[in-house]
Structures are given as C-alpha cells and as structure tokens.
Amino acid sequence: QVQVAESGGGLVQAGGSLRLSCAATGAIFSITNWGWYRQSPGKQRELVASISSSGSTNYADSVKGRFTISRGDAKNTVYLQMNSLKPEETAVYYCNVRRGGFTPQDYWGRGTQVTVSS
C-alpha cells in the first residue's frame, strides 16, 4: 500500500505562483510514475504533469512553460511549481502514484484546493 498526501494549495491572484507538494509513504520502492491531475466542478479530471522514475516528464499543453514537476532529494516527494496561474486553473489538484508490476496500481491523495482569483 502507498499513502499519498498533497499540500501547498491555497488562494493566489492571477499571475501568481504556488508550489504543490506530494509525499508518498508505505511501499514506495516500486513507484514507477508520479502525476499531478486537476479537476474543477463539472469537468473531468485531467493530467497536468507527470514524472517517471527515470526522470522523464510530461506536461499538458496548457501548462507547458509555466509549470514544472520535479522530484525532491528524498525519493518519496514530488513537487509541482506553478507560475503565471490563470483563474481557469482553479481546481482541486490531485497527486497520483503508480506502482509497477504485473498489475500496476494507482494511488491517489485527497487533493489540495487551488483557487486563482482574477
């Protein structure tokens, strides 16, 4: 089992920045991928950024050049640096952790609210 917890959300003005943190505990030795997703009311959850165990990153087109996903020195933490935030990016941001194996397993945190005011 893996426990996932996000932190760092809050209220920020348009154009501002926030850094989200995701910490995983438990069976983290087999994590193959970390991802940040977001979901706003009435919309589907969407991938914002991801980073693999090898360090490969992937971003949604809408955040390229503004958001950066990175791993902490400790292997159980991932960050999402968000710059130039827009009001339409107001959402609950979720961290996803995937464990590899014959049957990959996904673990989710409870999410952290990000509100961008105009």
Image: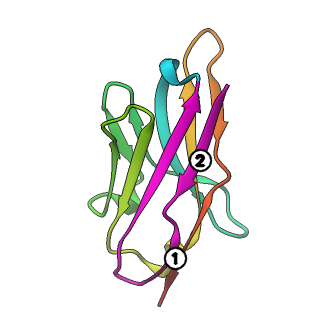
- How far apart marks 1 and 2 lie (CA) works out to 24 Å
Residue 104, given in percent of the width and then of the height, sits at 62, 20
Q: Which residue is label 2 attached to?
A: 5
Q: Residues within 10 Å of mark 2 (few under 14, many from 20)?
A: some
Residue 8, given in percent of the width and then of the height, sits at 48, 63
Query: What secondary structure is found at the residue carrying circle 1?
Result: helix
Residue 106, given in percent of the width and then of the height, sits at 64, 31
Asked where in the image residue 115 lies, by quadrant, the reply is bottom right
- Residue 18 in the magenta stretch? The answer is yes
Figure check: 12 above or below 46: below
Magenta part, dominant SS: strand
Which amino acid, by three-letter code, is at mark 2?
Ala
Q: Which residues are magenta?
A: 1-26
Compared across the picture, whether 54 is left or right of 48 comes to left
Compared across the picture, whether 85 is left or right of 93 comes to left
Compared across the picture, whether 79 is left or right of 110 comes to left
Figure check: 85 above or below 1: below
Give the colour scheme of this rendering: rainbow
Q: Residue furthest left?
A: 65
Q: Residues within 10 Å of mark 1 (few under 14, many from 20)?
A: few
Q: Which residue is label 1 attached to?
A: 88
Residue 40 circle label: none
What residue appears at the point 35 percent right and 79 percent down from the top-left corner? 16
Which amino acid, by three-letter code, is at mark 1?
Glu
Q: Nearer the viewer, residue 97 or 2?
A: 2
What residue appears at the point 64 percent right and 54 percent down from the top-left corner? 45
Q: Earlier in the sequence, mark 1 or mark 2?
A: 2
Q: Residue furthest bottom?
A: 118
Q: Residue furthest top?
A: 102
Quadrant in which the N terminus is drawn: top right
